Image (spheres, helix red, strand yellow):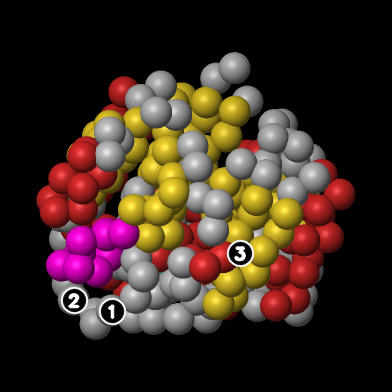
């Protein structure tokens, strides 16, 4: 079964993107695009078929396609992003997903960003953040619980999304930034904490037995390697200025 990774090009105007926890600084679009292309190459190297959703140059954050949907084997939830400026991003993604999955839409007043949703086995952790509200979490629960998933809401403070603070790096193993998320709800999982120097180091993209991980966090990378995690390193610092990380730049699912 092919593994598909949907991506979307870096907007020419990404420097005017949404920012919540970062100071605005200039973004070199050429460099961001080169890093994005290298990231897409990494996805291909690790076995994904990369499909680009149609460009959305006026949707400044559209490269961060993860936030527009949550794709389960059974169906896709089309989100209602918490940032008003991002609401227009979902339509083209829904259209692209339609041949692969039945789409279910998050309805107003619910808001949900895909970056707040961590699916680990049959547990769905959903961050209640500046972007995802309690109504959004309730709607994802109504959809996912009948499918046999356990949905757990988690408060997120200090960072943009739940997956800024915790991601899965191997079956049953989570990489976690304890400054931003309470480890208690993840009882039953093995956890690896980021190095204290790597504030933004908890976002890693697992593809089977490999993990795409930024070059910017060598101490945490060494920690992951010591745990037997096989890393494929990518430069992502230019996109990080737009408050995006490696999970944010694709939507991955099996066709
Ligand atoms: N710039 C990424 C976001 O705020 O959604």
Query: Is residue 176 placed above or below 92 in the rendered structure?
Result: below
The residue tagged 2 is 25
Residue interval drawn in magenta: 193-201
Graded by Cα atoms within 10 Å as few (under 14), some (14 to 19) or many (20 or more), the crowding at tag 3 reads many
Q: Main secondary structure of the magenta part?
A: loop
| Marks 2 and 1 close (CB-CB < 8 Å) | yes
Helix, strand or loop at label 3? It is: strand
Q: Earlier in the sequence, mark 1 or mark 3?
A: 1
Front residue of 192/59: it is: 192
Look at discs 1 and 3 and give the one toward the viewer.
Answer: 3
Q: Which residue occupies the foreground of this view, 104 or 222?
A: 222
In the displayed structure, would residue 197 be above or below residue 56?
Answer: below
Instruction: Find numbered disc 1 in the image and state the secondary structure of the residue it sits on.
Output: loop
Disc 2 element: loop
Magenta-span inclusion, residue 211: no
Q: Where does the image place residue 104, in percent across and percent down from the top left?
A: 78, 52
* Distance Cα–Cα, label 1 vs label 3: 22 Å
> Do the residues bearing badges 1 and 3 touch, measured as CB atoms within 8 Å?
no
The answer to which quarter of the image holds residue 212 is: top left
Residue 75, relative to residue 230: is it above or below?
below
Question: How far across and down, in percent of the image, does residue 102 sit?
Answer: 79, 40
Residue 22 visible: yes
According to the picture, the residue beneath numbered tag 3 turns out to be 126
195 within the magenta span: yes
Q: Could you say which quadrant of the image residue 153 lies in?
A: bottom right
Work out how far the residue at label 2 is from the one at label 1, CA to CA, in angstroms: 9 Å
Q: Residue beneath label 1, please? A: 22
Residue 195 position, x and y percent, is 20, 61
Looking at the image, is mark 2 or mark 3 nearer the viewer? 3
Which residue sits at x=77%, y=69%? 138
Q: Is residue 26 left or right of residue 19?
A: left
């Amino acid at each position: 079964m092919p593994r598909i990774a949907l991506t979307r090009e870096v907007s020419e105007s990404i420097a005017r993107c949404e920012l919540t926890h970062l100071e605005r600084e200039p973004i070199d679009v050429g460099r961001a695009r080169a890093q994005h292309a290298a990231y897409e190459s990494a996805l291909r190297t690790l076995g994904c078929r990369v499909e680009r959703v149609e460009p959305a140059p006026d949707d400044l954050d559209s490269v961060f396609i993860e936030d527009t949907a949550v794709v389960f084997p059974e169906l896709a939830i089309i989100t209602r992003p918490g940032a008003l400026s991002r609401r227009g991003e979902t339509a083209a993604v829904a259209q692209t997903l339609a041949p692969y999955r039945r789409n279910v839409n998050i309805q107003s007043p619910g808001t949900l960003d895909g970056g707040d949703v961590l699916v680990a086995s049959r547990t769905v952790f959903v961050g209640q953040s500046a972007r995802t509200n309690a109504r959004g979490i309730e709607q994802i629960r109504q959809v996912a619980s009948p499918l046999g998933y356990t949905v757990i809401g988690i408060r997120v403070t200090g960072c943009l999304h739940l997956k800024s603070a915790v991601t899965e790096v191997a079956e049953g193993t989570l990489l976690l930034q304890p400054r931003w998320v309470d480890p208690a709800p993840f009882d039953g999982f093995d956890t690896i904490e980021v190095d204290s120097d790597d504030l933004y180091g908890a976002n890693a993209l697992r593809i089977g037995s490999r993990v795409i991980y930024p070059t910017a966090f060598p101490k945490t990378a060494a920690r992951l390697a010591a745990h037997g995690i096989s890393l494929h390193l990518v430069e992502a610092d230019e996109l990080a200025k737009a408050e995006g990380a490696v999970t944010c730049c694709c939507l991955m699912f099996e066709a």
